[in-house]
Image: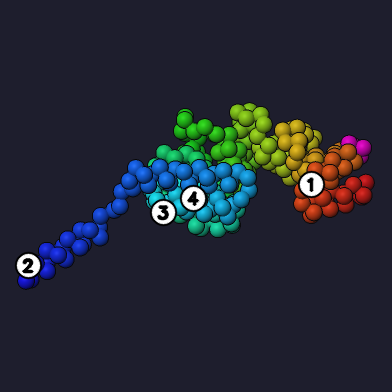
Amino acid sequence: MFRRLSTAWLLALALMGCKHVPTEQERQGAEIHYELGLQAQQVGNVQEAYKELQKALELDPDYPEAHNATGILLHLAFNRPEEAIQHYNKALALRPGFSEAKTNLANVYLSQARYDEAIKLYEAALNDMLYPTPFIAQGNLGWALYKKGETERALRSIKAAVTTNPNFCLGYKNLGVIYEETGNVSEACRSFAHYRESCPDVADAYLREGACQVKMGKMEDARQSFTTCEAKAKSKALKDDCRRLLEAL
């Protein structure tokens, strides 16, 4: 009797310790939900995107791309950085060379002012010759360096990013901010002009260029920038800012 109970107990422990391996059908289902999640995310339906990604992870908990995509939503759409960090770490545990997840995790650390941790991850991603979007890590590395007070290194890094991708809007914006905050108004205006040229539908680009043009004494150019800013602004707050600056000229 005791022997039978012991055997049954050991079998139960063994079964409890067995990790479920997704079937081929479950993997295919996870891929379908993952793709549906990405599609919903692209059109701005973040709740639907999150729901689909959760379904993908229920079918395949070891799906690194789904963990990475979930982390992006948690960080940027739902402002839940600690949960995002958990998903990025899971993605990296499953695939240590997942450079996109390294960059995204670094972005969370950057937003939390954990600059040294962010820099380490950006540099690791940039060491991956197969990383398809190195300009993102390069540009954000530069911003992290600037926040640490390493302005020259920051400028070199962000310039390298916009050289790699001449349409990298955030890179030009951050260059403009750095030049503006360090008193180099002419370079700031030049960078904001590149920002506006690369992102012609982004009202913020016209707002920043217009404010810089005012500092340069180019009032008519600033008037046109603020007018365009107001016309393109999608949020009421930004539209009001553009109108207020236009009326102040």
Give the CA separation, mark 4 to mark 2: 46 Å
Give the side of residue 230 with respect to residue 249, left or right: left
Q: Is residue 64 above or below residue 128?
A: below
Q: Main secondary structure of the magenta part?
A: helix
**Callouts 2 and 3 close, C-beta under 8 Å:** no
Give the secondary structure at mark 4: helix
Residue at 77 percent of width and 34 percent of height: 193
In the image shown, does 170 or 56 lie closer to the viewer?
56
Which residue bears the numbered disc 2? 3
Give the CA separation, mark 3 to mark 1: 40 Å
Residue 52, horizontal then vertical, whole percent: 50, 51
Residue 94, horizontal then vertical, whole percent: 38, 45
Q: Is residue 45 above or below residue 150?
A: below
Which residue bears the numbered disc 4? 53
Residue at 31 percent of width and 48 percent of height: 21
**Callouts 4 and 3 close, C-beta under 8 Å:** no
Quick one: which residue is furthest to the front in this view? 25
Amino acid type at mark 1 = Ala
Which residue bears the numbered disc 3? 58
Residue at 25 percent of width and 60 percent of height: 16
Quick one: which residue is furthest to the bottom in this view? 1
Which residue bears the numbered disc 1? 233
Amino acid type at mark 2 = Arg
Amino acid type at mark 3 = Glu
